[in-house]
Amino acid sequence: MNKIILFFVFAFAFTVSGFSQDISPNAIGLRLGDSDGFGAEISYQRGLSANNRLEFDLGWRDGNNYNAFRLTGLYQWVFPIDAGFNWYVGPGLGIGGYDYDDEFIAGSDVDDSGTFAYVAGDIGIEYNFPIPLLLSLDFRPELGFGDFNDDLDFDIALGVRYQF
């Protein structure tokens, strides 16, 4: 009995995944990752054509001694792999603001808040489910400018988005 159920599950999965996967005109959701502190981002993707899109992420980072918000914009090229799987790559820019914990900088002459900018790259893999759900895993190296983030940083995140 278990073999029959397993057969039908696999048959359904292969049948559903055989349909052509296109970039959805819109997708919104969350991007959960880590880069010097756990952070969550509200993520919006806008399809521009059959194989490229824009992505905008507004997020919050929380480290041991600071809080920061970030706004990132990316241009992505999307390449199909097979059966709903795609990989994507693209460049981007971002800006943000930060606020250090007052106890962390006590006695120092460093301003406890400010802004920063960064350039980013993005490479990842995603799966388009037959329902309007998109799961992704991406790697985003970022080169920062400013007092807060002036070096190379790596951001790895899981994205969950609703497509419409």
Image: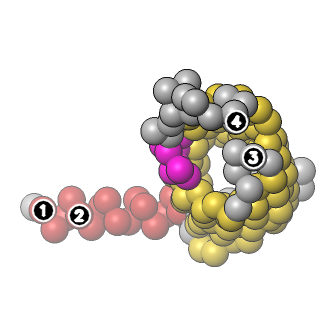
Of callouts 3 and 2, which one flags the residue occurring earlier in the amino acid sequence? Answer: 2
Q: Main secondary structure of the magenta part?
A: strand
The residue depicted at 68 percent of the width and 64 percent of the height is 152
* Residue 121 or residue 67, whichever sits in front: 67
User: Does the residue at mark 2 contact the one at mark 1 (Cβ under 8 Å)?
Assistant: yes
What's the amino acid at mark 4? Val
Q: Residue furthest top?
A: 102
Q: Is residue 135 above or below residue 9?
A: above
* Residue 33 inside the magenta-drawn segment: yes
Residue under numbered circle 4: 110
Name the image quarter holding the N terminus: bottom left
Q: Is residue 72 left or right of residue 14?
A: right
Q: Nearer the viewer, mark 4 or mark 2?
A: 4
Q: Position of residue 40 (x, y in %)?
A: 55, 37
The residue depicted at 21 percent of the width and 59 percent of the height is 5
Q: Position of residue 58 (x, y in %)?
A: 70, 34
Q: Is residue 40 left or right of residue 118?
A: left
Of callouts 4 and 2, which one flags the residue occurring earlier in the amino acid sequence? Answer: 2
CA–CA distance between discs 1 and 4?
65 Å
Residue under numbered circle 1: 2
Judging from the image, what secondary structure is the residue with disc 3 in?
loop
* Residue 36 inside the magenta-drawn segment: yes
Range of magenta residues: 32-40
Residue 6, which numbered label? 2
Looking at the image, can residue 24 be seen?
no
Instruction: Sort mark 4 into few (<14), some (14-19) or many (20+) by Cα contacts within 10 Å.
Output: few
Q: Nearer the viewer, mark 4 or mark 3?
A: 4
Judging from the image, what secondary structure is the residue with disc 2 in?
helix
Residue under numbered circle 3: 147
* Residue 114 or residue 73, whichever sits in front: 114
CA–CA distance between discs 2 and 1?
6 Å
What's the amino acid at mark 1? Asn
